[in-house]
């Protein structure tokens, strides 16, 4: 059989027609509807012309086309026609109606509805609310931040009252992508799941101004910009995203003529903090992520067991919190006189606005007086406990001879000074710098990592840190391999820190490596009589449960930073308070032997301990009951009842706030 070639001009016409139809369909639902309407009209005209003159002689062209349109759109007319030809045309029109009119229209409408639902699920529509709290970015901090905000209860109510009396907290999260996995993570969380309807997800990037407009940043009561623990080798780091977001919000607010919202931003690189403040001219609190964790680590090396103290202070879900209250009626009182008015809270100091900054005065001298406008820093279990009594409760006097007049701050620090750091991350330069601030304690540091030493030295130089080889030496070895770890003389060290790597893909991978290194270290230490202090950094709080009651302390960096960001978002003065507590110099939290205050084993009261601490120029915060031979294991009791009997054992130590 010979096939005749298709005429070339017809082929060209066919291709042009297909291209034209394609261009109309890709223009969207409106053009698809117009195309179907045109096709229905064309079929109606053809059908009307075909039956013209076969029925009623008075029927004109318009009547025939209307007859065809009715058969095309409504199959109920099938069977009403007479004559073979009209029935054939009517049947063809009815079948075409099923295919074109009903099938095509339903398909277009269904596809449009599905696309609209997908668009809504992806969070592409702008939110139309005000005075909400925005969390920009889905990182390892996001869920803990949301959890901490939802647990804040009274803090949230007071925060909402201050910003305009809003009764319901609305949280908006900007994520790079809204997936079923992330939505599921919100629903199954024991805290977030109960109030998941108060959380609005929107997809977008902090780098794009229109995406920040999507979450109504400039109309928010507070904006939280958390950092990322894990980053690729891209030049667009977490800090770059944060600074770009600050610039975008600043420009949007100025363009709209609205007030700039309050922002809490986490910056990893300490040297980028000035850039961040330059980028945003509104109310801004910058939390130096790497430096904050480094400070907590160094404080924990100096005072083993301290991790449980700052875990309680930073989390609303555990025990006591730090509250900031302004009581103008107490202006003119000395801090010690004002402290007697709080029977269920501990007055730690004040924060005072000076020029354009906020200055904390923690554990000030006995003669320090509260000035008008000062805000008190109180340790309490609830907000209600931070209200002063009208009249102070009479306290028994303490004789001068009952307390030593001075205490040596150095006695609060362990004598060990050789510190082994296993692993490398962006926190290590900040950690080494923090150790250097305690120059009088003469730390000897050793860093063991598989990362080449030349790269480490370069990273330190880029950070602006020049470490003397006599103070810090580098060893190139993989601590997760037993053979290489045994080349390190771990018996000589007083403290060992296992750093969580930030070069791996996720927190689970980093923690798996850290835990393996810890188990190897634990096995090797069984052979040693001398047991060093061990501090393990993890990236996922779920993995902390795997450690059980093993020797050593665990800190979960993203969790602690999340708590800090959430607390500062609700009360901005807390940033300077925590910064004061965990940096060298000024006030800091440490441990005391009760004998330092002249208190022996047996029954006493916390009120008695508190008065003795005052006479020594310190503030007693609670008691740490060590339940094992390890100094890093025990039960923390902050702000106990002042008047109840408090039995002291030989292993118990006191938690105090003192000034170094």
Image (cartoon, rainbow, N blue to C red):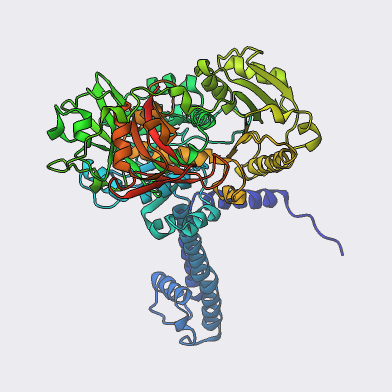
* Residue 303 relative to residue 13: left or right: left
Residue 358, placed above or below residue 530? above
Name the one closer to the observer, 534 or 93.
534
Q: Which residue reaches farthest right?
A: 1
Residue drawn at (38%, 20%) of the image = 278
Q: Nearer the viewer, residue 335 or 110?
A: 335
- Name the quarter where the N terminus is drawn: bottom right
Instruction: Report the side of 287 relative to 480 (left or right).
Output: left
Up the image or down, 437 lies above or below 494; here it is above
What is the x, y in percent for residue 400?
A: 27, 27
* Image vertical order of residue 56 relative to residue 23, above or below: below
Asked if residue 494 can be seen in this view, the reply is yes
Q: Residue at x 32, y 42 (%)?
A: 606
Name the one closer to the observer, 16 or 102.
102
Quadrant of the image containing the C terminus: top left
Q: Which residue is nearer to you in this view: 147 or 342? A: 342
Does any portion of residue 136 appear in the rendered image?
no
Q: Is residue 520 left or right of residue 584?
A: right
């Amino acid at each position: 059989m010979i096939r005749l070639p298709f005429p070339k001009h017809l082929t060209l016409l066919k291709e042009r027609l297909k291209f034209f139809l394609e261009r109309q369909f890709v223009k969207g639902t409106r053009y698809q509807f117009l195309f179907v309407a045109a096709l229905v009209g064309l079929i109606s005209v053809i059908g009307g012309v075909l039956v013209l003159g076969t029925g009623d002689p008075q029927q004109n062209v318009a009547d025939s086309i209307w007859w065809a349109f009715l058969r095309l759109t409504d199959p109920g007319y099938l069977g009403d026609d007479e004559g073979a030809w009209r029935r054939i045309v009517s049947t063809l029109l009815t079948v075409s109606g099923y295919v074109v009119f009903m099938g095509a229209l339903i398909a277009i409408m269904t596809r449009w509805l599905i696309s609209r639902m997908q668009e809504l699920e992806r969070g592409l529509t702008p939110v139309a609310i005000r005075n909400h709290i925005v969390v920009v970015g889905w990182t390892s901090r996001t869920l803990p931040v949301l959890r901490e905000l939802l647990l804040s209860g009274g803090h949230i109510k007071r925060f909402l009252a201050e910003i305009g009396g809003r009764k319901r907290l609305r949280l908006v999260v900007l994520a790079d992508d809204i997936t079923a996995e992330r939505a599921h993570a919100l629903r199954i969380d024991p805290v977030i799941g109960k109030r998941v309807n108060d959380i609005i997800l929107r997809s977008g990037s902090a780098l794009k101004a229109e995406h920040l407009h999507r979450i109504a940043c400039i109309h928010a009561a507070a904006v939280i910009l958390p950092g990322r623990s894990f980053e690729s080798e891209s030049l667009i780091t977490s800090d770059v995203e944060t600074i770009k977001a600050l610039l975008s919000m600043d420009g949007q607010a100025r363009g709209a003529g609205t007030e700039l919202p309050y922002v809490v931003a986490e910056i990893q690189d300490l040297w980028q903090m000035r850039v961040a403040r330059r980028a945003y001219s509104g109310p801004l609190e910058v939390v130096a992520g790497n430096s904050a964790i480094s400070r907590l680590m160094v404080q924990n090396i100096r005072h083993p067991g301290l991790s449980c103290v700052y875990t309680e202070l930073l989390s609303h879900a555990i025990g006591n919190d730090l509250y900031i209250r302004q009581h103008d009626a107490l202006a003119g009182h000395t801090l010690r006189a004002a402290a007697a008015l709080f029977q269920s809270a501990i007055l730690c100091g004040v924060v005072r606005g000076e020029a354009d900054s906020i200055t904390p005065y923690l554990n000030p001298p006995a003669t320090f007086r509260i000035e008008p406008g000062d805000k008190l820093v109180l340790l309490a279990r609830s907000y209600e406990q931070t209200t002063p009594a009208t009249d102070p409760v009479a306290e028994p006097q303490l004789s001068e001879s009952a307390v030593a007049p001075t205490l040596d701050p150095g006695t609060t620090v362990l004598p060990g000074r050789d510190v082994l750091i296993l692993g490398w991350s962006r926190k290590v330069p900040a950690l080494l710098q923090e150790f250097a601030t305690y120059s009088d304690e003469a730390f000897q540091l050793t860093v063991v990592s598989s990362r080449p030493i030349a790269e480490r030295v370069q990273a330190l130089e880029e950070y602006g840190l020049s470490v003397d080889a006599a103070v810090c030496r580098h060893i190139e070895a993989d601590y997760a391999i037993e053979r290489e770890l045994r080349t390190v003389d771990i018996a000589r060290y007083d403290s060992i820190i296992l750093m969580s790597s930030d070069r791996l893909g996720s927190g689970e991978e980093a923690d798996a490596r850290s835990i393996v290194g810890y188990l190897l270290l634990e096995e090797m230490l069984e052979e040693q009589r001398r047991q060093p202090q061990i501090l393990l950094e993890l990236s996922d709080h779920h993995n902390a449960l795997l450690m059980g009651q093993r020797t050593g302390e665990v800190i979960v960096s993203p969790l602690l930073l999340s708590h800090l960001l959430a607390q500062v978002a609700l009360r901005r003065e807390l940033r300077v308070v925590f910064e004061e507590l965990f940096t060298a110099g000024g006030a800091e939290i440490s441990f005391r032997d009760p004998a330092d205050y002249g208190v022996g084993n047996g029954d006493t009261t916390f009120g008695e301990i508190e008065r003795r601490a005052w006479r020594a120029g310190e503030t007693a915060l609670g008691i740490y009951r060590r339940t094992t031979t390890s100094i890093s294991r025990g039960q923390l009791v902050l702000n106990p009842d002042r008047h109840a009997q408090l039995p002291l054992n030989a292993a118990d130590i006191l938690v105090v706030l003192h000034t170094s």
